[in-house]
Amino acid sequence: MRLLTAVLRTIRNSRRLAIGLVVLLLLVLVALCSPLIAKAVGGGQDPIELAAYEKWLVPSPQHLLGTDQFGRDVFAMVVKALSVSLQIGAIAGVISTVVGVVVAFVAGYKGGWIDGVLSTFTGILLVIPTFPLLIALSAYAKNVSLFQVGVMISIFSWPFAAKTIRSQVLSLRSRPYVDLARVSKSRDLEIIVTELLPNLLPFIGVGFASSALGAIFGLVGLEIIGLGPGGVIDLGQIIFNAIGTGALTLGAWPMFVVPIVLLTLLFAALNMVNIGLEEVYNPRLRGVAGE
């Protein structure tokens, strides 16, 4: 109950955070309802099967966004693709955030040579151009699944979360209540979980949102150049198909425009969550925003 009260108080303190969460929750709700939406659109058949309908049908009450070059309903495809894009964001976001939190707490709390080694390794990964490496891994890996792509993306996205959280751990570890916990002979893990972790939840949220956003757009980039995972339909693949088939010249503009609109909404929502959390928990930023 205390945690829920704190979350609601945080949302009330930032309009940007509230708007971002509302937009994000609406997109997640649409994605969760994708099987029901596909069933309703298909009316007893799978609307994203090959040759389910005629090719290149224009938007109409029967097909709100028309059909593609294979006769698939574009509206059902977009909803399914949104679900896949959110899945890749969740997979990469969770993995990169967990790894980043572990590295940040070990480096920031222990300090010394451990902090030096981990910080150096994190800094090296931060300056490595990640997208070319993703292209190389995707090009040489065969039959890559959605989960495997999420793992590949998370390998290069955790350093940002680690660096952000580490700086906060360095600040909090010298606080009086942490010193008191040490004097009372609390174990390091207990101090981290009970004293440090609750105070860093907003920064962990920022790290997760940034990693998830990077993963979603990373997958879009791979799909647009034709190196995405096989057997799935995501927003990047629909854009790739629209470009490759000249959908705009054929009047099938929803294939290109709608995925870009959804990606823009995702980008805006996650960034508003980031900015909102920083406004609430960063006094200097809150002062600037209030002027």
Image (spheres, helix red, strand yellow):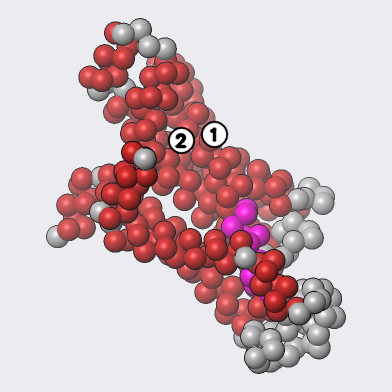
- Residue 106: percent from left, percent from top: 46, 23
Which one is in front, 69 or 75?
75
Q: Which residues are magenta?
A: 76-88
Is residue 119 visible in the rendered structure shown here? Answer: no
Q: Is residue 56 left or right of residue 178?
A: right
Q: Quadrant of residue 81?
A: bottom right
What's the residue at 37%, 33% (across, down)?
198
Between 49 and 230, the one lying in front of the other is: 49
**Where does the image place residue 199, in percent across and percent down from the top left?**
33, 34
Marker disc for residue 162: 2
Point 69% across, 89% down: residue: 62
Label 1: state its secondary structure. Answer: helix
SS label for mark 2: helix
Q: Residue at x 71, y 46 (%)?
A: 148
Disc 1 packing (10 Å; few <14; some 14–19; many ≥20):
some
* Residue carrying label 1: 99
Instruction: State the quadrant of the N terminus.
Output: top left
The question of residue 84 being in magenta is answered with yes
Mark 2 or 1, nearer chain start:
1
Is the residue under label 1 in contact with that under label 2 (CB below 8 Å)? yes
Above or below 187: residue 101:
below
Q: Is residue 100 visible?
A: yes
Residue 103 versus residue 51 in the image, above or below: above
- Which amino acid, mark 1? Val
Q: Residue at x 17, y 58 (%)?
A: 290
